[in-house]
């Protein structure tokens, strides 16, 4: 009976959000943000005024990367569980212990507590005007469907004057071997036409759903598609997705990533017949001088892209582990001076001290014990999950002031 009640409560919440979301999509709940489009190599609003997207990634919420969420990953010696490495193995372990319905209830509780309405208010107060929302296509296979959590975020962002970039972090078949695709060592997307078609189908649903919603700045087709065998295949697949979106939604920005294969291979948008396309790249320094080298390189490429009339967006970046707050501030200032939009990684993490790390605007203190998926009782799991609300975390005030000062 308890399991059935949990499921009924979740579904009732979904019905409430359906009503609220309808108001958001029609602009009835709050003043709508202006629509964005590209013009002359820049992102602009409806009056042609240049818009610089200053964003933060909502990592860990719908894509559980184990280094940044509060779960233990190593099973006890001799236990009948595998190591938890990603979204798939995390929830599979809890299903193994508690069954499908209870696992779904736990996952719902984690998401409700990890990110709340108040977090969007904090993000806006810190000087941001945008959030990049990583999600997995797997939402479509969940009981609440593809849009419950996406709508939750879009509705909250709308109330606080924040744009949302919808970022498919994990595609059907996965676009690389990385665990942040939702299932590591898979990388089947670029080898299977049926998986490409399924990815297109999911994006078609998303485009149809949000086509009249200006709060959504645009669609990031796939995060870090490093699994593509070459740049020709990479852009061919993204072109297929682009066209199925445009059949339903001619208006939103579309963000196309280079998959670390080099932005010089990006097709000319005029030749490809792409409209409102933004090139997206990511940056994490691999050595002490990497930041300076990257800044010089990115400024050269920005000039080349503007000849193609295509804006550049730094969808993920941080200066860890080779930088500091002063370096972060200089990095952001250089980007903004050249009109480059950006979203830092990330809003919230666990396992990092707020005074020492630049990884999160908020970090969970060590006194908050991690969930042990292999041993904890249901009661213990729900209790620990509630402790990871941002109100219990430590704010990285130096990092927050940095972004406020660069506004």
Image (cartoon, rainbow, N blue to C red):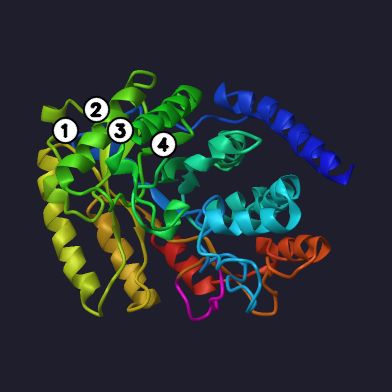
**Marked residue nearer the N-terminal end (2 or 1):** 1
Q: Which residue is mark 4?
A: 217
Quick one: label 3 or label 1, which is nearer the N terminus?
A: 3
Instruction: Please give the label number shown on residue 269.
Output: 1
Give the CA distance from mark 3 to mark 1. 24 Å
In-front residue for pair 317/64: 64
Left or right for 330, reference 393: left
Mark with earlier residue (4, 2):
4
Residue pictured at 12% horizontal, 38% vertical? 308
Query: Disc 3 vs disc 1: Cβ atoms closer than 8 Å?
Result: no
Q: Report the label total.
A: 4
**Residue placed under numbered mark 3 in the picture:** 193
- Residue on which disc 2 sits: 275
- Callout 2: helix, strand or loop? loop
Mark pair 4, 2: CA separation? 14 Å
Is residue 269 visible in the rendered structure shown here? Answer: yes
Q: Which residues are magenta?
A: 349-358
Labels 4 & 3 near each other (Cβ < 8 A): no
């Amino acid at each position: 009976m308890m399991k059935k009640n949990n499921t009924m409560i979740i579904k009732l919440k979904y019905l409430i959000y359906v009503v609220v979301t309808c108001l958001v999509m029609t602009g009835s709940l709050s003043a709508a943000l202006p629509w964005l489009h590209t013009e002359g190599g820049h992102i602009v609003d409806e009056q042609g005024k240049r818009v610089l997207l200053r964003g933060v990634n909502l990592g860990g919420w719908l894509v559980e990367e184990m280094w940044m969420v509060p779960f233990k990953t190593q099973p006890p010696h001799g236990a009948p569980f595998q190591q938890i490495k990603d979204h798939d193995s995390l929830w599979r372990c809890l299903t193994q212990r508690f069954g499908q319905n209870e696992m779904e209830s736990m996952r719902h509780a984690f998401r409700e507590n990890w990110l709340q309405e108040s977090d969007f208010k904090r993000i806006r107060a810190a000087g941001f005007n945008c959030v990049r929302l990583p999600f997995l296509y797997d939402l479509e296979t969940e009981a609440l469907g593809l849009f419950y959590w996406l709508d939750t975020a879009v509705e909250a962002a709308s109330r606080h004057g924040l744009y949302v970039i919808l970022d498919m972090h994990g595609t059907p078949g996965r676009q690389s071997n990385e665990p942040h695709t939702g299932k590591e060592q898979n990388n089947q997307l670029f080898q299977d036409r049926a998986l490409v078609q399924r990815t297109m189908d999911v994006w078609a649903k998303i485009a149809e759903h949000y086509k009249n919603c200006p709060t959504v700045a645009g669609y990031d087709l796939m995060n870090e598609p490093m699994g593509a065998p070459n740049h020709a295949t990479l852009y061919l697949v993204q072109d297929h997705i682009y066209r199925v979106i445009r059949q339903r939604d001619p208006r939103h920005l579309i963000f196309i990533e280079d998959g670390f294969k080099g932005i010089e291979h990006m097709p000319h948008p005029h030749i490809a017949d792409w409209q409102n396309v933004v090139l997206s790249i990511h940056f994490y320094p691999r050595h002490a001088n990497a930041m300076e080298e990257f800044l010089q390189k990115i400024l050269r490429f920005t000039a080349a892209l503007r000849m193609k009339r295509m804006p550049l967006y730094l969808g993920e970046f941080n200066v860890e582990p080779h930088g500091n707050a002063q370096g972060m501030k200089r990095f952001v200032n250089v980007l903004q001076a050249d009109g480059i939009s950006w979203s830092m990684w990330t809003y919230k993490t666990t396992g990092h001290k707020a005074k020492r790390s630049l990884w999160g605007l908020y970090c969970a203190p060590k006194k908050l014990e991690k969930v042990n998926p292999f041993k904890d009782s249901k009661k213990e799991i729900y209790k620990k999950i509630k402790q990871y609300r941002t109100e219990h975390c430590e704010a990285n005030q130096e990092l927050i002031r940095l972004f406020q000062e660069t506004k």
